[in-house]
Image (cartoon, helix red, strand yellow):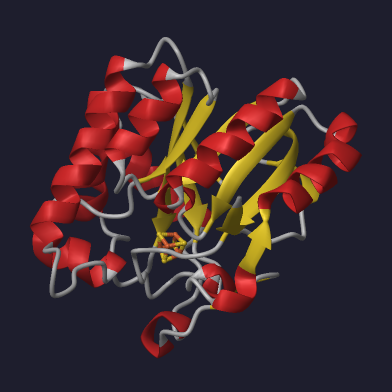
Amino acid sequence: MEGYVDNNLFTEYNPIIKDKTIVINFYGCNFNCPFCYAQQFHEFKSESIIEIREIKQELRRIYFNAKYVLFTGGEPTLQRIVLNNLARFSKSLELETFIHTNGSKPNVIKDLIENNLIDGVILDIKSPFESKIFEEITKSSNFFVSSNKIMDEVKKSIDVLRDNRDKVKIFVTTPILPGMNFDEETLDQIYEIIKYLRVPWILMRFKKKSDFGEVKDKVLLSYEKPNNEELKEIILKINKANIPFKII
Ligand code: SF4
């Protein structure tokens, strides 16, 4: 079996999972978020195709050094068969499996949960469900799929997770984007979604670059990181149901 997967597996302390985690990056994403600093994983390029047995060999070599494996990228749920296969293999090594997803493939998430292939889901909720701002933040619509359709899919993922809260660990991540979602009204709308799920909310401070690339959007690049205190103040003001939150 072949797939679009990065063969540079690495182990790191993951601040959301809070333990040593092997990271497996999938290539290809159906969103085009202007703040994305994982640009190198955006596209399905022919040179990124690899035999999945090579990923497994590498995983077998390093698995003893971690408790978790995280499938991320890019958007791992776009390669359903490869993801299921690697999750099953990871479970056979007694690793606990997590995916980090934009939530656009509810059926893939449901399938992973129903087949006991996943122990945790990190779901990105970057925007309220309002097409104008959702499109501005995710740049995900195209000739074939509208923002409304994509938002409907993310809502279905939220329902899948809510129905399976007892079976998997769930975290919601929101990248804080100056000029896009970093204001009380917008964060309050996102908070209403988190409140419905009742899971920990991880607020990720905007980063201009990572080991995997740089933000390309010039307007975003001109902003400074949000001030932690200001952000905390807003969250405490809107968080009336006392949802646990963390700023990383
Ligand atoms: S969904 Fe994630 S990987 Fe895809 S473009 Fe947005 S930030 Fe990047």
Image coordinates of residue 104 in percent, x first then y, are 29, 48
Comparing 76 with 31, the one in front is 76
243 relative position to 247: left or right: left
Image coordinates of residue 136 in percent, x first then y, are 22, 71
Residue drawn at (55%, 68%), measured in percent from left and top? Answer: 41
Image coordinates of residue 72 in percent, x first then y, are 56, 50
Comparing 12 with 190, the one in front is 12
Residue drawn at (18%, 73%), measured in percent from left and top? Answer: 142
Corner quadrant of residue 194: top left
Residue 172 visible? The answer is: yes
Q: Is residue 124 above or below residue 63?
A: below
Tell me the quadrant of ligand 1: bottom left
Q: Is residue 106 above or below residue 163?
A: below
Q: Is residue 139 above or below residue 228?
A: below
Residue drawn at (70%, 70%), measured in percent from left and top? Answer: 211
Q: Is residue 92 above or below residue 138?
A: above
Corner quadrant of residue 139: bottom left
62 relative position to 223: left or right: right
10 relative position to 62: left or right: left
